[in-house]
Image (cartoon, helix red, strand yellow):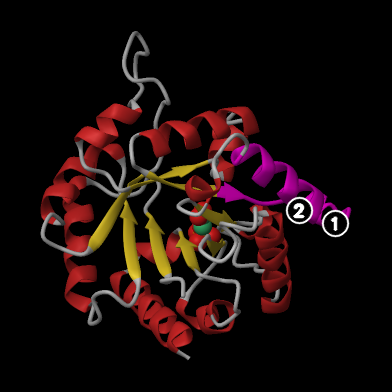
Amino acid sequence: MRVPIIVGNWKMNLTIAQSEMLVQSIHYGLPWPGEVDVVVVPSFTALLKIEQLLKKSYIGIAAQNFLMKENGAYTGEVSISMLSDLCVNYAIIGHSERRQYFNETDEVVNQKVKAAIQHRIIPIICVGETDEEQQLGLTETVISKQVNHALSGLMPEQISSVIIAYEPVWAIGTGKTPGPAQIEKVHAFIRCLICSDAISKLRILYGGSIKPENSQQILSQPNVDGALIGGASLNAVGFTEIIKIAAQCKKQ
Ligand code: PGA
């Protein structure tokens, strides 16, 4: 049985004070510790403050990005060991915004996945096709290339500890989503790409315009183990509503 996981990616949106307020409201609204893994992803400027606030809570914390080097002359970057120092539990890798605007290639994604695992930080690896690729019927080709590159060189037990987020690029921030059956089809396809020892443990999240209104249909799909949420995670009421829906869907 895979524990569902709901991740709120705040992207480049909140000040430290706003981040504190949001995490306190989320904490206040959460009734069921243990049934769902809940993770928030603040910006770097708020990471330390939120980590301190969440020390005694069961809400996990993720970084939006890092550089896979330990240290050195890389002005402006945050290293993987700095994330360990902050006791960050997870890191998003290969988000489409980083692939699109910051040249995060499949090779870089693979290096970051390995660095995160080495530092006991759980990678949340994002994969997904663009609108054009979807229209050309290339979804499975794109996904298999991204997944195989990201996991290249990992042992089966390392693969079972990573999280994959299927995020169609055309669904991110647009209000559009694939139908639940299409999401389930891609998630089942991703699971088939995984080596047999890791297949039943690996968690696969859906991301892209998830909101309380569509989350029940999506989260009730058998191969959907949770969600990576952008816009809707900035609202504590909506975000906790999705967490409750995830708990209900996965109980059945
Ligand atoms: P969205 O973003 O929920 O705002 O579509 C999802 C994401 O970028 O992970």
Residue 145 in view (yes/no): yes
In this view of the protein, which residue sits in the foreground, 95 or 68? 68
Is residue 105 shown left or right of residue 70? right
Amino acid under label 2? Asp
Q: Label 1 neighbourhood size at 10 Å, few (<14), some (14-19), many (20+)? A: few
Q: Are marks 1 and 2 in contact (CB under 8 Å)?
A: yes
Vertical position of residue 30 compared to residue 193: above or below: below
Residue numbers of the magenta segment: 126-151
Q: Position of residue 205 (x, y in %)?
A: 53, 63
The residue indicated by pointer 1 is 135
Q: What residue is shown at x 73% (from left), y 70% (from top)?
A: 185
Residue 100 included in the magenta stretch of the image:
no
Residue 102 in view (yes/no): no
Q: What residue is shown at x 27% (from left), y 44% (from top)?
A: 88
Q: What residue is shown at x 67% (from left), y 77% (from top)?
A: 180
Vertical position of residue 17 compared to residue 202: above or below: above
Label 2 sits on a secondary structure element that is helix
Q: Position of residue 157 (x, y in %)?
A: 49, 49
Q: Position of residue 4 (x, y in %)?
A: 43, 71
What is the CA distance from the residue labelled 1 to the residue labelled 2?
6 Å
Residue 131 included in the magenta stretch of the image:
yes
Q: What residue is shown at x 22% (from left), y 82% (from top)?
A: 31
Residue with the most extreme top position: 73
Label 1 sits on a secondary structure element that is helix
Q: Assess mark 1: CB under 8 A from ligand 1?
A: no
Q: Assess mark 2: CB under 8 A from ligand 1?
A: no
The residue indicated by pointer 2 is 131
Q: How many marks?
A: 2
